[in-house]
Image (spheres, rainbow, N blue to C red):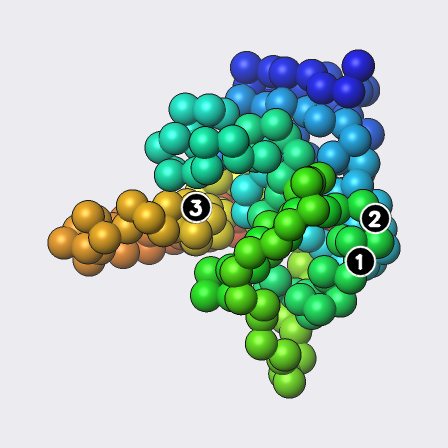
Amino acid sequence: MTTTFYDHWGDVPESTWRWTNFSPAEIACRGTGKLLINAPALDKLQALRDRLGKPLIVRSAYRSPEHNRAVGGAARSKHMDGTAFDIAMTNHDPVVFEAAARSVGFLGFGFYPRSGFMHVDLGPARQWGDRFAIRATAFAEDTPPAREVLAESRTMKGGGAAGVATLGAAGVEVAQSVLAETQSAVLPLVPYLDTLRWVFIAVALIGIAVTIYARLDDWRRGQR
């Protein structure tokens, strides 16, 4: 069986999850929390991570049909099959990334330089968008996504608040992901952007506070 569906990523048994550099939360639908595990696609994603030797920041993976409609996704988007991934280029050379993705078996490529990510999927073979400009500056230091660092916190696990805390700490990252997915729906929100900016700032500050608390508590317990 190559696909398995869960109503929420939290229902995935740890013993069945074999993609060590990713979590169910990263691959799940951003709008509903539902998760369709497509094993061949995730095998290729893990192979790409292994080949590149550095973290992949997944902006969008599986999308439920309702969330895909909400963000203006294509009617037959590969995201709904669990075979497509939008990966941030923050810490990657897009040229190297594309070559590595092709070498492990990805066939569909979408380039979004203005939003800072590349779409890859299992095909059919095609591509769209303008390629990224060649970079002359160093890339950002490789660090795991904020929600993944917090998810491993013993304090967060012990308190049963991992889901809430990681979403708070990754507020800005999630906001960027949502905006990247909803480019076609941004214009109607223009009158409210100032309010949304303060909402995002508040979420980010709450996340930072929770992160500091978790790290201090872990340190006091001698766990890190």
Q: CA distance from mark 3 to mark 2?
A: 25 Å
For numbered disc 3, what is the local secondary structure? helix
**Camera sees residue 50:** yes
Residue 208, above or below 39: below
Residue 66, above or below 101: above
Q: Nearer the viewer, residue 164 or 115?
A: 115
Is 63 displayed left or right of 199 in the figure?
A: right
Q: CA distance from mark 3 to mark 1?
A: 24 Å
Residue visible at 77% across and 20% down?
A: 2
Q: Nearer the viewer, residue 180 or 204?
A: 180
Q: Could you tell me residue 186's position as x and y percent?
A: 28, 50
Q: Which mark is residue 203?
A: none
Is 101 displayed left or right of 197 in the figure?
A: right
For numbered disc 1, what is the local secondary structure? helix
Q: Label 2 crowding class (10 Å Cα cut-off): few <14, some 14-19, many 20+? A: some
Residue visible at 52% across and 51% down?
A: 212
Residue visible at 69% across and 40% down?
A: 123
Q: Label 3 crowding class (10 Å Cα cut-off): few <14, some 14-19, many 20+? A: many
Q: Are marks 1 and 2 in contact (CB under 8 Å)?
A: yes
For numbered disc 2, what is the local secondary structure? helix
Amino acid type, residue under disc 2 in the picture: Val
Amino acid type, residue under disc 1 in the picture: Ala
Residue topped by disc 3: 181
Residue topped by disc 1: 100
Amino acid type, residue under disc 3 in the picture: Glu
Residue 26, above or below 179: above
- Give the number of marks: 3
Q: Which mark is residue 104?
A: 2
Is 84 displayed left or right of 202 in the figure?
A: right
Q: Could you tell me residue 117's position as x and y percent?
A: 56, 57
